[in-house]
């Protein structure tokens, strides 16, 4: 499935026509808050969408699992984990859960070697320890308290079971917040089988809690590469059960099914994808004519881009840095590579602490934004010897090279806030002349022959989810969007969506946002009939055109 070498450029496609929006489900759901006796036909949900297929340009080739990079991992572990591991770009954007009660190092035995049974007598799962289910249930209940919008959607729609008959196979981070999404899908009528999209992302006790309720979960924190693909295969390949919907994060599940079980796609109604890497893979398949089902691009929805990327990173970057380094950032020289939504969030947080922040950028528009926001725009090579902290958030590869790492001063901190672990050239640091010293979980000192130390966080993987946590409220926004996308694709009449990649319509972005406003006791101003006519808008939205940039 690998694409030709070189840069991949996807032309932007505009739909030949827009699907007509109905009065749509947003109003009907909202009406239910006024009268408990109000009813809503979930069949109307499909008509709420006017998703338009779009193609976005991709500036670099996305590697599939066949394109692997070999390196010797430090530190080593016994059992299934080997010194030299073959790692795919997507599956090694490794996350560890700081909130997890358990760590994979507590027990070296593999869950694959155990036979476990839940209280219902089922053994259709594979987790670290099913006895941790009670702890996981407590974490899920805590997460529910800050995911009120998703819980509200669950309560409004569960009586009609809009996902009745849906068999969803999912590959995401298995955390307490994701568990709230999974249990919402089950409450809406779906059957679910789930695995982790990353070898370090699973909260073991949450996986146990889900397995206890009957969700077939195959995941644990600290999987080997072999375990990772075995878990995906167990989710997909189950006798007497065949998926008809896919919820993916990174594209590994979709890729595995295309590679191993292509006939399954005859019954798949749609794919929902939330990550940059996974969306790029879908656009590649579409361009090559190999995408055989409709797909929803959740990653580029407004509520995902603006809230998950900007506001989430603005809070979680400090959490990750403080937990791992205990460094005071006032007066520190910080370079942030990339001034997109993630970069903007990181800059705002560090500037507020008194750090002296500079930016590197390739895009003149983003660079001008940085200048107008009061940041210097520099080339990394020009300031590398004076930098205290480097944070990458570009989505590119080799943003920080070995030559630059060699020139950094003693005690410098290097970390990544981008989706992929390719931004820092970590592989070049695994050489005999350099010594790796594990200081604490996800914190390594890389020591040069002259005694210089560079502090590398999370082995170049995504910092916030590797070394801390992400605000639950933000995940509620993304999870609600995912749930609505699944409902839409599953209930859409035949022919509405072709074999292409679609964006959620503006109206549904607005609906997701409106669900979360009650948390802040926010009250929207309503347009008068005269005002709506003057602006040429429907009083109930959408309020902005699709091309509007927030």
Image (cartoon, rainbow, N blue to C red):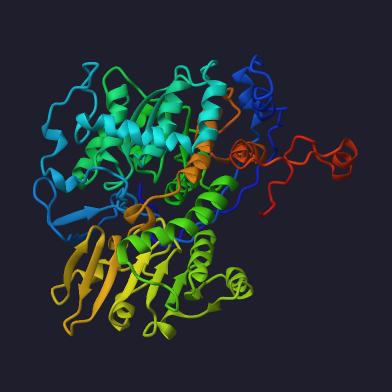
Q: Tell me where residue 332 appears, x and y as whole percent.
A: 42, 77
Res. 210 visible in picture: yes
Q: Is residue 423 visible?
A: no
Q: Residue furthest left?
A: 78
Seen at 40% across and 32% down, the residue is 141
Quadrant hosting residue 117: top left
Between 143 and 77, the residue placed more toward the observer is 143
Is 512 or 278 nearer to us in this picture? 512
Point out residue 521 in the picture as x, y percentages from the top left corner: 64, 40
Say above or below: 455 vs 480. Answer: below
Left or right placement of residue 349 versus residue 68 in this view:
right
Is 520 left, or right, of 412 in this rendering? right
* Left or right: 531 as drawn, with respect to 158: right
**Residue 74 lies in what quarter of the image?**
bottom left
In-front residue for pair 112/410:
410
For the image, the number of numbered tags is 0
Looking at the picture, tell me which residue is in the foreground, 293 or 24.
24
Q: Is residue 242 left or right of residue 490?
A: left
Residue 438 on image: x %, y %: 18, 64
Instruction: Please tell me which residue is depicted at 50% across the width and 57% down the height of the picture.
Output: 58
Q: Position of residue 351 (x, y in %)?
A: 51, 71
Task: Identify the residue at image location x=85%, y=45%.
Answer: 535
**Can you tell which quarter of the image residue 285 is in?**
top left
Instruction: Identify the residue at image location x=16%, y=35%.
Output: 111
Quadrant, the C terminus:
bottom right
Tell me if residue 187 comes above or below residue 497 in the rendering: above
């Amino acid at each position: 499935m690998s694409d030709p070498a070189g840069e991949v450029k996807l032309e932007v496609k505009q739909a030949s026509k827009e699907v007509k929006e109905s009065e749509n489900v947003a109003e009907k759901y909202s009406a239910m808050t006024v009268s408990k006796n109000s009813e809503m036909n979930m069949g109307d949900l499909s008509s709420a969408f006017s998703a338009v297929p779009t193609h976005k340009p991709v500036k670099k080739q996305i590697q599939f699992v066949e394109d692997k990079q070999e390196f010797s991992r430090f530190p080593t572990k016994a059992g299934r984990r080997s010194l030299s591991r073959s790692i795919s770009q997507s599956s090694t954007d490794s996350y560890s859960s700081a909130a997890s009660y358990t760590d994979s190092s507590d027990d070296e035995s593999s869950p694959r070697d155990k036979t476990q049974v839940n209280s219902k007598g089922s053994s259709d799962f594979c987790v670290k320890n099913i006895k941790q289910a009670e702890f996981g249930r407590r974490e899920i209940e805590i997460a529910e308290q800050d995911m009120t919008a998703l819980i509200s959607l669950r309560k409004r729609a569960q009586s009609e079971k809009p996902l009745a008959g849906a068999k969803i196979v999912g590959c995401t981070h298995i955390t307490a917040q994701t568990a709230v999404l999974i249990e919402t899908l089950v409450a809406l009528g779906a059957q679910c089988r789930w695995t982790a999209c990353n070898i370090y992302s699973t909260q073991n006790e949450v996986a146990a809690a889900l397995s206890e309720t009957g969700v077939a979960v195959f995941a644990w924190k600290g999987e080997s590469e072999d375990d990772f693909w075995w878990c995906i295969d167990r989710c997909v390949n189950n006798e007497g059960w065949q998926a008809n919907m896919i919820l993916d994060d990174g594209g590994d599940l979709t890729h595995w099914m295309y590679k191993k079980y292509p006939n399954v796609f005859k019954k798949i109604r749609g794919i929902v994808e939330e990550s940059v890497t996974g969306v790029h893979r879908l656009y590649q398949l579409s361009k090559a004519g190999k995408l055989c089902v409709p797909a929803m691009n959740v990653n580029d929805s407004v509520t995902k881009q603006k809230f998950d990327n900007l506001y989430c990173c603005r809070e979680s970057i400090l959490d990750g840095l403080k937990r791992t380094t205990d460094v005071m950032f006032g007066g520190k020289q910080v370079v942030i590579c990339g001034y997109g939504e993630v970069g903007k969030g990181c800059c705002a947080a560090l500037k507020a602490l008194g750090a002296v922040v500079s930016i590197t950028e390739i895009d003149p528009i983003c660079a001008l934004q940085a200048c107008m926001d009061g940041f210097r725009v520099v080339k990394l090579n020009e300031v590398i010897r004076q930098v205290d902290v480097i944070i990458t958030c570009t989505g590119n590869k080799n943003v920080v090279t070995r030559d630059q790492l060699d020139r950094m001063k003693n005690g410098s901190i290097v970390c990544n806030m981008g989706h992929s672990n390719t931004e820092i050239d970590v592989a070049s640091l695994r050489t005999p002349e350099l010594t790796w010293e594990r200081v604490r979980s996800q914190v390594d000192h890389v020591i040069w022959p002259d005694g210089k130390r560079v502090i590398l966080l999370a082995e170049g993987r995504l910092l916030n989810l590797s070394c801390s946590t992400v605000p639950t409220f933000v995940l509620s926004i993304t999870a609600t969007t995912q749930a609505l996308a699944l409902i839409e694709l599953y209930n859409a009449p035949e022919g509405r969506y072709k074999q292409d990649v679609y964006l959620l319509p503006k109206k549904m972005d607005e609906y997701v946002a409106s669900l979360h406003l009650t948390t802040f006791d926010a009250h929207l101003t309503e347009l008068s009939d005269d005002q709506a006519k003057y602006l040429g808008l429907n009083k109930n939205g959408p309020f902005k055109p699709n091309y509007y940039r927030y």
